[in-house]
Amino acid sequence: MYIKYVQGKPLFTHINNDKKQYSYLTEDIETDICIIGGGVTGAIASYYFSKNNIKAVVLEKKRIAHLSTSVTTSLLQYELDDNLSDLKTYTTLENALRSYNLGLKALDEIENFINKYGNKCDYKKRNTLLYTSKKDDVKSIKTEYDLRKENGFDVEYIDESRNKYDFDLKAGIISKNGGAELDPYKYTNELLNVSCGMGAKVYENTEVVDLLHHEDYIDVITESGYKVRAKKVIVATGYNTKLFTDRNFGTMTTTFNIATKPVSSFNGWEDKILLRDNGDPYNYLRTTIDNRIIIGGEDVTFVPDIFNEKLADKKYDILENKLKSMFKNIENIEIEYKYCGAFASTPDNLGFVGPGPKHNNLWYLLGYGANGIIFAILGAMMLTELYDGKVNEDMKLFKVDRFDN
Ligand SMILES: Cc1cc2nc3c(=O)[nH]c(=O)nc-3n(C[C@H](O)[C@H](O)[C@H](O)COP(=O)(O)OP(=O)(O)OC[C@H]3O[C@@H](n4cnc5c(N)ncnc54)[C@H](O)[C@@H]3O)c2cc1C
C-alpha cells in the first residue's frame, strides 16, 4: 500500500525557490558510510561523518528535504514533549534530565555550525515558554519548574499576575535560550553543501530497494540496479522504515500546521518566544524571519491515507481560530499555507540511534518525538564515534530495542 506521509502546501519548500538539484546514481560505488534518506536527519549525518573524515554517500529516493523535513515546524528545544514527572513512568528522572542536557548540547552544536559557516538558514536562538491556561494544571507546571530549577536549568516561573502575553496564561516556564528556530529546507541544503565540500556524495531520485548483508559490508541496491558498497549503512528514512525492519518504532499521529502571510506586528508576543501549551495534544507556535506565524497541533491518530480533506480543513480552521483568539492585537492574520504530516512519538519521548539487534552493520538514526532534529544531531555524533569503535554512554538512552521485553 502506498503511504502518504505529508500533505498540503508546506511553507518551507514553497518559499525557497532556489532549489539545488543533485543527480541520480548511475554507477556502482564504494564508501565508508551509506546514508539512506535525504531529509534533515540524513543531511546532519552526512555533515558529522564528513567532518570526521569518514566517506559518506547520501541516497534520496525523491528530492532532498521534501518529505517530513518540508513540514517540520523546526522548533528546536531541549525540553521533551512530556514533563519530567510524567516521564518517570517510562524512564528514570536521571535519564530524562540527561536528555534535557543533551538537548542543550545539540542546540550549541547548531549554533557552532552557524558560527562556522554563516547563517544561511534563518537561524535564531530563542527563549521558550511552556504554559497552561487551565487552573487545574498550574500545579504540574510548578512541579516541572521546580525540578528544572533544582537541576540547574535557566528557567523563570510566571503566573497569571505576571503574564506579559496577550493570551490566557495561568502558569508558565520561560527557558532562557532554551530553544532556536530555523528554516529546515535551507538548513538541510546547507548541511549537504558543506558535506559535499568535505567529500560527501549526494544522489537524488535514487531509491534504495534492497540491502545485501555481508560480514564486513552491505551492498545497497538502488531501483536502477546500481550498487553502493558500504562498511556501514544508516537508515535515515524518517517514518518509513518498512524496507529495513518489521519493527514498529513509535505511535503514529498526523499533526497539522498553518502559516500566515507576513504580519505587521507581534503585539502581545514578547520576544517572539517559542510557544507550547500543555494540552494533550498540545499546540505549538513560532514566528519566521519574514514575520510569519506558524501554529501547529490538533494531532489525530495517523491513517495511511492522511489526505482526508474534510478533516484537515476542520483542523486548519481550529488552528486559525486559536491563533486569532490568542493574539487579538496582531492585525491582518491571513493564512497562506496549510499542511500536515505523519509524526511518531515514543513512550520516553526519545528517538532511536544505533545498530538494530539483527544486523551489526545496519544503523538507525530516527528522530522520533517532537525533538527529531535535536536527536538527529546527538545521534549523528554518537554514530560517528561508534564508527571509530567508541561507544558513547548516552547511546543507551536511544537504543533501538529498548522497549523489547
Ligand atoms: C507538522 C510537523 C511538525 C513537526 N515539528 C517538529 C519540530 O518543531 N521540531 C522537530 O525537531 N521535529 C518536528 N517534527 C518532526 C520532524 O518532521 C522530523 O524530526 C524531521 O523532519 C524528520 O526528518 P527526517 O530526515 O528524519 O525525515 P524525512 O524528512 O521524512 O526524510 C526521510 C527521507 O528518506 C527518504 N527515503 C525513504 N525511503 C527511502 C528509500 N528506500 N531510499 C532512499 N530514500 C528514502 C524519503 O524520501 C525522505 O526524503 C515535525 C513533524 C511534522 C509532521
Image: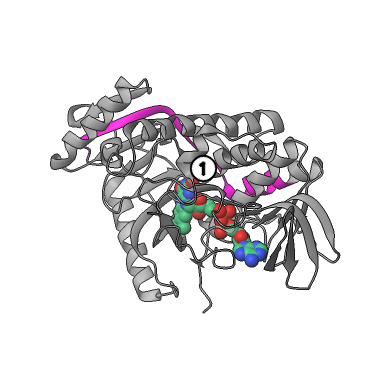
Q: Nearer the viewer, residue 222 or 18?
A: 222
Q: Looking at this rendering, what residue extends furthest in the right direction?
A: 27
Quadrant of the image containing the C terminus: bottom left
Look at the image and give the residue range highlighted in magenta.
Answer: 169-192
Disc 1 Cβ-to-ligand 1 distance below 8 Å = yes
Q: Nearer the viewer, residue 153 or 259?
A: 153
Name which quarter of the figure residue 45 lies in: top right
Q: Nearer the viewer, residue 157 or 164?
A: 157
Q: Is residue 175 magenta?
A: yes
Left or right of residue 334: residue 14: right
Left or right of residue 116: residue 291: left
Pinpoint residue 226: horizontal percent, then vertical percent: 80, 68
Name which quarter of the figure residue 115 lies in: top right
Q: Which residue lies under the disc numbered 1?
A: 375
Q: Nearer the viewer, residue 367 or 225?
A: 225
Q: Is residue 284 magenta?
A: no
Q: Looking at this rendering, what residue extends furthest in the front direction?
A: 215
For the point 42% across and 31% down, the residue is: 98
Amino acid type, label 1: Phe
Q: Mark 1 falls on what kind of element?
A: helix
